[in-house]
Amino acid sequence: MPADDAPDGTDAGPPYDCPYCDGRFHRESYLSLHRGQEHPDALTDAERAAFEAAREEEEEQLRLFRLQALAALVFIYFGFLLVYAFSL
Amino acid sequence: MRHERLRTVGAAVLVASLAVALAGRAAAHGGSLQADDARSLAIPLWLFLSTGGGVVGVSFLLTSFVTDRDLIRDIHDRRREVGLSAATRRTLAGVARLVGVVGLVAVLLVGAFGPADPLRNLAVLVVWVGWWAGYTMTTYLVGNSWPALNPWRVGLWLREWLPAPSPSYPARLGSWPAVAGLLGLVWLEVVSPLADDPRLLTGVVLAYTLVTLTGAYVLGETWFERVDPVSRVFAAYGAVAPLYSDDEGRPRARVPGTGLEDEGLARDASDVAFVAALLWVTTYDGLVATPPWRDFASAAVGGGVPAPLLYPAALLAGFGLFLGLYRWAVRRGRRDAESYREPAELARRFAPSLLAIAAGYHVAHYLGYLIELSPALVGALAAPLSPGAPVAVVLPAWFSALALGFVLLGHLAAIWVAHAVAYDLFPSRMQAVRSQYALTAAMVFYTMTSLWIVSRPYAAPPFV
């Protein structure tokens, strides 16, 4: 995957290349997740530990995101409820 | 005849559907939209539009709660074979080809010599009600049977009997001819009385027949793969359907919509453009029949813009806007997701999700039309040359709620497909979520545009 020609600044910073395929990532945790998902049989012990750590970090972020999404849903629901109540 | 009916039905469906879903009180007025000031939206326009956009946004939030990779993959991979023997398949294919050819001949003959009243003419009813409304629905609800039915495929037989030319199709043309063909057909449909004049319709079908037979003879299968807009439309809708045929032509079944997640469905940038064109033409069809368009067109023509240029210019400008917005959303999503993948690759993977929305709008526009006019179609089929007086079905009030399900379903399917594709593309699930912000915003825009159009009263397109 050629990646040096991104005008939007996405590709700033050092890329993390996958040693098993041509995958290329912005963060070490993305690379760890990719290795664990796509090359599970080729992992060294250190890579496996990195995969587990990255997955825990991802879970943590997802938990936070779910809370935010839930808050947004509640906000939208009651927002519309109120708007409908006052505009009809 | 067609526009007014379509717009009334489509508006009733969309308005009532959203109203039923989100505000009980509006539902009572949902079916009586259009025409004069006394019968307007029961809720303010801004609230109507933001409710529609809100439904799409909420679908995104709800979908993002599904974070189990295995579940998402299982839903996509849940496919099984449909037991049909090779002999049965051959028989069915033969019957389909016969039906297609007989249908085409009947349309040409009755269109040229039958009754001039469009509601009693078999050609008009078969083309618009039977084929473009009814048959198209089967391509996304059941499966794409057009390759079997397509009567113009006899052009391929000519290649076997006659010395077949074998020019190489320039690869860089891609599906751009089909994009141009689709836009061209819709332009023709808007500026001419194609749905009201059986003789004109026959002429267009005849011209299409000549062009397609020649094209199929010269280019072979490539013609239907890359150039013919009709085949491309049905192939695109067929990707939504539960039934499909695998690489060896055996029929298989899948969860409806999950076919859109397959890699390689959009092969290049021109296929992405075709999806955007398919989504845009439904919108354009409605847009040119609104009072704001009438005012705009009058002002533009008054300001010196030649009237014949106005419609194609607006068609191309809107197409560019829809496509440009989609591309922007993909690039923006790429940045949000911090991905090194090529923007073009992401555009190809996410584009098919929009087909589910296009299919949903097709149902909303045409289901009522199909049911209302199907007795007229049956009457014309029973007595092609002297059908009785046309009978129209009067739709019950709850009907709009039924079609609502399909509109919402199209959006839910699109959001789900994009969600599943993002999970397939990005190693981190947070990347997948972030990649969807801009795309969801684009879908909200498409929805609100369509809702704005269907909530405008009908005004016949000027200068045509």
Image (cartoon, coloured by chain):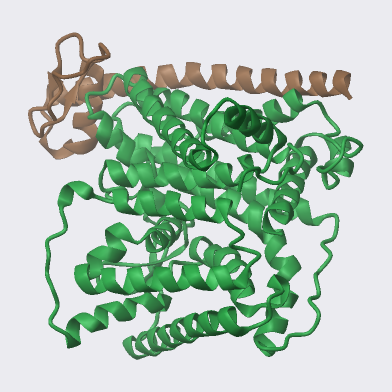
Chain colours: A brown, B green
Question: What is the quadrant of residue A84 in the picture?
Answer: top right
Asked whether A78 or A4 is in front, the reply is A4
The reply to whether residue B76 is visible in this rendering is no
Q: Residue furthest left?
A: A19
Q: Position of residue B132 (x, y in %)?
A: 55, 64
Q: Residue furthest right?
A: B38
- Identify the residue shown where x is 14% and y is 11%: A14
Q: Position of residue B23 (x, y in %)?
A: 82, 34
Relative horizontal placement of residue B413, taking residue B179 as reference (left or right): right
Relative horizontal placement of residue B87, taking residue B238 as reference (left or right): left
Relative horizontal placement of residue B69, taking residue B412 as reference (left or right): left
- Identify the residue shown where x is 37% and y is 39%: B350
Count of marks overlaid on the render: 0
Q: Is residue A30 above or below residue B323?
A: above
Q: Is residue B88 above or below residue B35?
A: below
Q: Residue furthest top?
A: A13
Quadrant housing the N terminus of chain B = bottom right
Q: Is residue B313 above or below residue A51?
A: below
Asked whether B304 or B356 is in front, the reply is B304
Q: Position of residue B435 (x, y in %)?
A: 39, 26
Asked whether B419 or A19 is in front, the reply is B419
Q: Position of residue B212 (x, y in %)?
A: 34, 69
Relative horizontal placement of residue B379, taking residue B86 as reference (left or right): right
The reply to whether residue B404 is visible in this rendering is yes
- Identify the residue shown where x is 88% and y is 41%: B29
Q: Is residue B271 above or below residue B325?
A: below
Question: What is the quadrant of residue A21 in the picture?
Answer: top left
Asked whether B235 or B294 is in front, the reply is B294
Question: What is the quadrant of residue B196 in the picture?
Answer: bottom right
- Identify the residue shown where x is 49% and y is 57%: B256
